[in-house]
Image (cartoon, grey):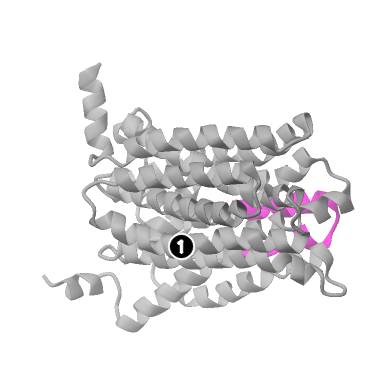
Amino acid sequence: MSTKNTTLEYSPSHQAQWLLLLGIIFVGANLRAPLTSVGSLISFIRDDLDLSHALAGSITTLPLLAFAFLSPFAPKLANRLGMEITIFLSIILLTIGLILRSLFGTSFLFIGTLMIGMAISIGNVLLPGFIKMNFPLKIGFVTGIYAVFMNLFGALGSGLSVPIAAIKGFGWKGSLAFWAIPAIISLLFWIPQLRKSTESVKVGEAHSQKEKSIWRSPLAWHITVFMGLQSLIFYTLITWLPEILQIHGYSSNASGWMLFLMQFALIPITFVIPVTAEKMKDQRILSGITAIFFLAGIIGLFLGSKLLIPISVILIGMAAGSAFSLAMMFFSLRTSNGQEAAEMSGMAQSFGYLLAAVGPMLFGGLHDLFHSWNVPLLLLLLIAIIIFIAGINAGKNTVISDSSVQNKIAR
């Protein structure tokens, strides 16, 4: 059977595949910007609402907690309603959350933020599986495409937030509300998918011995730690990089664009890495280089040289893009089938984002305690070293079922 014919089994027409790809792209475009747009505005929000650094950090932490606690339930919800409808409802929830977060008082800021996190967590979990179901022969390519647009809009969220807030009558509330527009557009692009007769894959029925073996698998835990700690670094710096840079003489606007640069640097990497990783025998070299980039970039921020900071920001961006893409690919490359991949995704995104949720609040709390960013940055250096170790183990050419068997034999 030719590649062309095999692909067509998953889509009734070439036109339908392109329409589906556009829908995936526009949904992916909303999985970062609602969060990254906060980082550049955090000082304005904190001052306007009189929040502490730790409480302000929770604006980023709340969505990560939603990622952690809702991720295991997203496949079950998709089983009941169908993936297409579940994703559509998540975008509606996202739109409502964006409006509530932006237009009302402090309480609605946090309620809306939590709703945004719940909506994005569904997309985070379901899109990789949705891609595997509909583009089984092009997983690396389509994963790279949606990751590029996700991070492109994430970068725009950081770079445009302060300029939009500076428009008369907008302020930080209007700037955050602006990101409801892409969410509404994505709803329109996803509507054609609702016409499809959905055959839900039973990814939610994971109460088996195989599921238990995943939670007992050292390889699965290496992937989970890799996923969680790279997210911790990314979301911590999304929240606090502008304030760190302002200590080194950057204006609010300039620091926002440096945050944009960090995310812009990861955009080409998020396309190259999935395609490259899929072709390699193992991914240990990619994992090691990723961790080294994290280390070099964080050291540059610690030193605080104006010559080094742009280079450091680019290195961190490249590391973040590579780490995220590797984590997504590990879900497929380190598993034997779609069921196991879904279980791995649920485990890594649940526990991993719970681990990541600690970052922004802990980072802000350490700053409040020591009145300096040096100690928090030293903590990120230690985390980058752990990412190196976990990444090397996650990148080995094996699958979770094999590693689980080997673990039982070793016992």
In the rendered view, would you say 376 is above or below 182?
above
Describe residue 343's horizontal placement relative to residue 98 as left or right. Answer: left
Position of residue 1 measured from the top left corner of the image (x, y, whole percent): 11, 70
**Residue 75: percent from the left, percent from the top?**
44, 50
Q: Residue furthest top?
A: 411
**Rendered residue at 24%/22% (across/down):** 408
Work out which quarter of the rendered image holds the C terminus and state it.
top left
Residue shown at the point (79%, 68%) measured from the top left: 165
Q: Is residue 305 left or right of residue 397?
A: right
Amino acid type of disc 1?
A: Ala
How far across and how far down the image is residue 337, in percent?
26, 48
Q: Is residue 309 visible?
A: yes
Camera-nearest residue between 91 and 162: 162
The answer to whether any part of residue 217 appears in the image is: no
Image quadrant in which you'd find residue 162: bottom right
The magenta stretch spans which residues? Answer: 90-118
Secondary structure state at the residue bearing disc 1: helix
Give whichever of 29, 163 is nearer the camera.
163
In the displayed structure, 86 sits above or below 301; it is below
Residue at label 1?
A: 147
